[in-house]
Image (cartoon, rainbow, N blue to C red):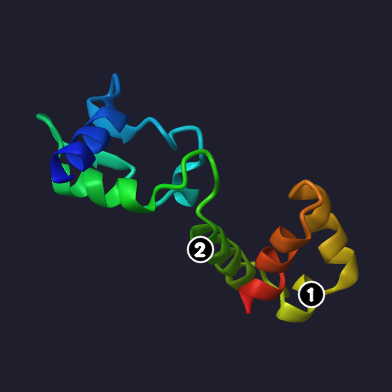
């Protein structure tokens, strides 16, 4: 029900010492790799629509892979000499595999998925 969804959204956001409201389900994930609207800046209670929207796409303690791919694309574009050929090179893939805990799926996301 709508009331149940609103209650869940409201209960998953907590107010920080800085006065912003933050999703407690994904607060340990780096901000740039969370689903949108994980932090809401407001003095009173946050907007239930924004909280519900975030809850519908929140990945909890997992990275939002779409955001992660965008971050990698941004890094590739900002590093002089970095090309797609380097990212899909077996040596680079081996480094990424170590960084992502051996997950072949994540290696594909952060290498071939960047194109």
Give the residue at the far top of this rendering: 17
Callout 1: few (<14), some (14-19), or many (20+) C-alpha neighbours within 10 Å?
some
Instruction: State which quadrant residue 87 falls in.
Output: bottom right
Determine the secondary structure under disc 2.
helix
Considering the image in quadrants, where does the N terminus appear? top left
Instruction: State which quadrant residue 10 falls in.
Output: top left
Return the mark for residue 88: 1
Residue at (27, 24) in percent of width and height: 18
Give the residue at the far front of this rendering: 1
Relative vertical location of residue 8 with respect to residue 98 in this rendering, above or below: above
Return the mark for residue 45: none
Relative vertical location of residue 35 with respect to residue 90 in this rendering, above or below: above
Residue 92: % across, % down: 83, 64
Give the residue at the far right of this rendering: 91
Residue 13 makes an appearance in the image: no
Choose between 56 and 68: the one closer to the eye: 56
Return the mark for residue 66: 2
Residue at (59, 72) in percent of width and height: 77
Determine the secondary structure under disc 1.
loop
Choose between 96 and 83: the one closer to the eye: 96
Residue at (20, 48) in percent of width and height: 50
């Amino acid at each position: 029900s709508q009331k149940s969804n609103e209650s869940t959204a409201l209960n998953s956001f907590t107010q920080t010492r800085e006065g912003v409201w933050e999703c407690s389900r994904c607060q340990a994930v780096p901000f740039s790799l969370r689903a949108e609207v994980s932090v809401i800046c407001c003095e009173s209670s946050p907007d239930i629509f924004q909280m519900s929207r975030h809850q519908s796409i929140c990945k909890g303690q997992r990275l939002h892979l779409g955001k992660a791919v965008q971050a990698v694309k941004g890094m590739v574009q900002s590093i002089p000499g970095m090309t797609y050929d380097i990212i899909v090179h077996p040596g680079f893939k081996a480094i990424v595999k170590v960084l992502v805990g051996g997950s072949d799926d994540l290696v594909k996301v952060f290498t071939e998925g960047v194109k």
